[in-house]
Image (cartoon, rainbow, N blue to C red):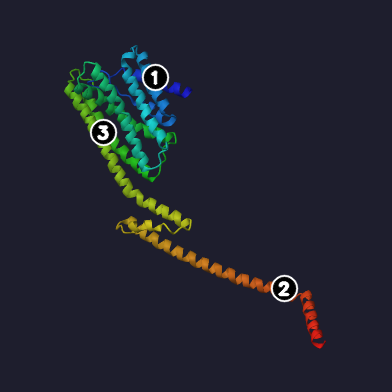
Amino acid sequence: MLTLLGAILLYGVANYISGKKFLPGCSFAELRPQVCLPIFMGIFYGPLFGLLTGACGDTLGYLLAGTNPLPLWHWAAANGLMGLIPGFAARCNARKVTTLKGMQTLYMLLLLSTSLPYIFSCGVEWALGPLGAKEAFALLFLPIFVTDALFAIIIIPLCMLGAGLLVINIPTAIFLMTTYLTSLVALATFAASMVTIWGRRALSSLAASNLYTIGVLALLVIILGFAVAAFFVRRITLPILTLTRSADDMANEDYEHLGDLDDLKNRSDELGRLARAFASMIAKVRYREEKLKAEVRQLHITIDRNKQQKEVSKITDSDYFKTLKKRAAELRIKDGTS
């Protein structure tokens, strides 16, 4: 409970501070890196924590600014949904991200949680307010979505890494490195465009609209980077994972699943050469193991025979056995003469 109250307080204060400076051409949207807080609370603690952190924290920000939060209920609801969506998704799936597929799912959730709630709130704003549909989309939804999505994409994976919810291995490390490079390049382009027009006294709505169109293009570049990164990660890491599984199978003396190397051996690059060398090594190890097992079985048979002979000799060489043998011979002679 203290964690939840602390998160709500932190989110409310951060919203109050960021609300003092709006984005170029906007009368409501601002830079909010704190949007990662309700998203992370939802992922780490569950959907209820994410919902309450976003909704109550946003309401607290309005109260601190001296604004009546009741007419802005739909924005508080959107902030709550931003924490609720990834929270439910994390509960339906494993929270810990360990695979490339898990990384792709995480980034998809971040995009959904920073877009769907604000489609709802901007729709309410358009339906109830003086803004037209085009203005609500270009000067309200786009600024919020672009900036919140960029912050979430960059910050949330670091938070999950610190909380132990993101496991770094070859696929996730390569995917993270590629997507971060793409995100930073796109973010730098968008930030440079924003700095160029921020603070102008005569800022037209067209210039602001063009700015956030650049932001959308930056997000599209990042999403395309996700797809390209996933393709190359699979291309690079799947052969390595196949070789790793084959090594584990060999260590466990399981040679039934080594057919996975067949496709890899057909490659003409260095990985194909490595697969062919590895398959040859496995075949030699398997031959030597089978030969050694056969020799061990033969040795057991020889040892058992020698042991049997020693046991028999021990019995026949005993005085008791000799006495019995002598008495048996005497009985046979006696029976033959009687």
Q: Which mark is residue 314?
A: 2
Do the numbered discs 2 and 1 sit on residues whose CB atoms are within 8 Å? no
Q: Which amino acid does the dot numbered 2 rest on?
A: Lys
Do the numbered discs 3 and 1 sit on residues whose CB atoms are within 8 Å? no
Residue 227 coordinates in the image, percent (x, y)? 28, 41
Under circle 3, the secondary element is: helix
Residue beneath disc 3: 219
Q: CA distance from mark 2 to mark 1?
A: 92 Å
Residue beneath disc 1: 56
Residue 244 coordinates in the image, percent (x, y)? 41, 52
Left or right of 286, for residue 204: left
Closer to the camera, 183 or 286? 286
Crowding around mark 1 (Cα neighbors within 10 Å: few <14, some 14 to 19, many 20+) is many
Mark whose residue sits in front, 3 or 1: 1
The first of marks 3 and 1 along the sequence is 1
Q: Residue at x 35, y 17 (%)?
A: 16
Q: Residue at x 36, y 45 (%)?
A: 171
Closer to the camera, 3 or 87? 87
| Snapshot quadrant of residue 322 | bottom right
Residue 77 coordinates in the image, percent (x, y)? 34, 21
Crowding around mark 3 (Cα neighbors within 10 Å: few <14, some 14 to 19, many 20+) is many
Q: Residue at x 21, y 26 (%)?
A: 196
Closer to the camera, 68 or 285? 68
Q: Quadrant of the C terminus?
A: bottom right
Q: Which amino acid does the dot numbered 3 rest on?
A: Leu
| Snapshot quadrant of residue 106 | top left
The first of marks 2 and 3 along the sequence is 3
Q: Does residue 35 appear anywhere in the picture?
A: no
